[in-house]
Amino acid sequence: MAFARQRSGQLLLGRASGSLLRGACARAMSPPRCFALELPGCTLAHFFFGGDAAAGPDDGGALGDARADPRLAALLEPPGRRYSLWVPVAPGAGCAARVRAAKLHQRLLHQLRRGPLQRCQLRRLLCYSPEGDVQHGVLLHDPRDSPDTRSALLALLDACQEVPSPRLGEFVGDTGSRVWWQHLWELRDGQGWHLADRQRVLPAPEPALHPVVPDLPSSAVFPDRGAARAVLEACTSFIPEAQAVLDLVDQCPEQVQKGRFPVIVIEGLDATGKTTVTQSVSDSLKAVLLKSPPACIGQWRKIFDDEPTIIRRAFYSLGNYIVASEIAKESTKSPVIIDRYWHSTATYAIATEVSGGIQHLPPAHHPIYQWPSDLLKPDLVLLLTVSPEERLQRLEGRGMEKTREETELETNSVFRQKVEMSYRRMENPACRVVDASPAKEKVLQTVLSIIQNHCT
């Protein structure tokens, strides 16, 4: 699969058509884009497209082929046919272009789960460059190799009016399945859709960091208020509530200071006892109890939870800045207890965006785990934990409406582990872990003891 279009006479990755041969010299000087495919077992295979389209199956020995990575070869081999579908984003694109691409990618995923395409198996596919920009797509496997699948995919392209439009690739192997190629589908004037020149599928080395990590500050873990605000500004034309959120944010001072009373954040997965502990601690300390996202925007939470990650995380990030303004005011009069804050926003974003298993998370002490410099910092962050078995037991019968991420916590143990590990790697301030499995009176006693020792 080739994943990106570069505008203004630059390359279209995948070198799809003969008209792009004039860019051969530029391509030779630029490092190839690579691709990360999520495999069974939460591992990743990395590959790129290259080689001479006219070369035979034995001509690329120095580079190898897809079979050099048996995991990748197993996904490309028969039965069935594989396709790639992705949304190109120009390198360095601004918020508006990134938001449009995210919305289109989400819409394509919905369409892939309907009609003749719903029988296809989907795997997450990322395209990345050395500069750190990332594009999102999927690898589709049609186990029956039905012509209806190809027709439905081309119909998706025909129906799409966005610019740049989605790109569709098709994988083809030679008779002995020793070499794999990818063809891009292109639209020729007056001739309809045609398969363009092929490109060899070649294994790529695994990068030192998961390819999405350099992109996180632009797409999910926003480093400051301005970065999150720019995203919602790009949404006001199709999400009226985005302007309402921005209006509330603009009423908050850009720089606020904590008062003389302690500010304590209590974090944790659902059913770890956060609600009980925050209320009990608040009562014991005669503290003000706040929650993120705050009540003034909580009414719109369901709307933003249904949006792509970049929009959803911008909403939650700005919620933290609204809460910070409330903390500054209340901490001049009494202690403040907060039910979730920035750590929660960041950990869920990291766990969602970093594909694969826990081993692909950013390493400890990576800057992504650092508190934003312009957000009011608490005195103490407590992380409540219970065993997965006990947490599921507590969830039974609660009957509460769950967000998409809360539902995934219950069904996806790898996602839960990535959230928990991200919490533990947070720094400045780090999370103080509290075992919340004992009786609630014992947990309250432990929490109050930690607060007394740390905040007095």
Image (tube, grey):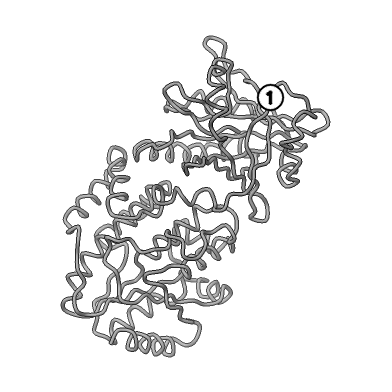
- In the shown orientation, is residue 379 left or right of residue 213? left
Q: Nearer the viewer, residue 161 or 93?
A: 93
- In the shown orientation, is residue 198 left or right of residue 279? right
- In the shown orientation, is residue 427 left or right of residue 119? left
Name which residue lies at 50% across and 71% down.
395
Name which residue lies at 50% across and 82% down.
437
Q: Amino acid at mark 1?
A: Asp
Asked where in the image residue 375 lies, by quadrant, the reply is: bottom left
Residue 386, compared with residue 73, is above or below; it is below
Q: Nearer the viewer, residue 396 or 225?
A: 225
Q: Nearer the viewer, residue 157 or 432?
A: 432
**To which residue does mark 1 refer?**
52
The location of residue 131, given as percent across then percent down, is: 47, 41
The location of residue 129, given as percent across then percent down, is: 52, 40
- In the shown orientation, is residue 139 left or right of residue 322? right
Quarter placement of the N terminus: top right
Residue 205, compared with residue 174, is above or below; it is below
Identity of the residue furthest to the top in this view? 190
Name which residue lies at 46% across and 61% down.
366
| Number of marks in the rendered image | 1
Q: Secondary structure at mark 1?
A: loop
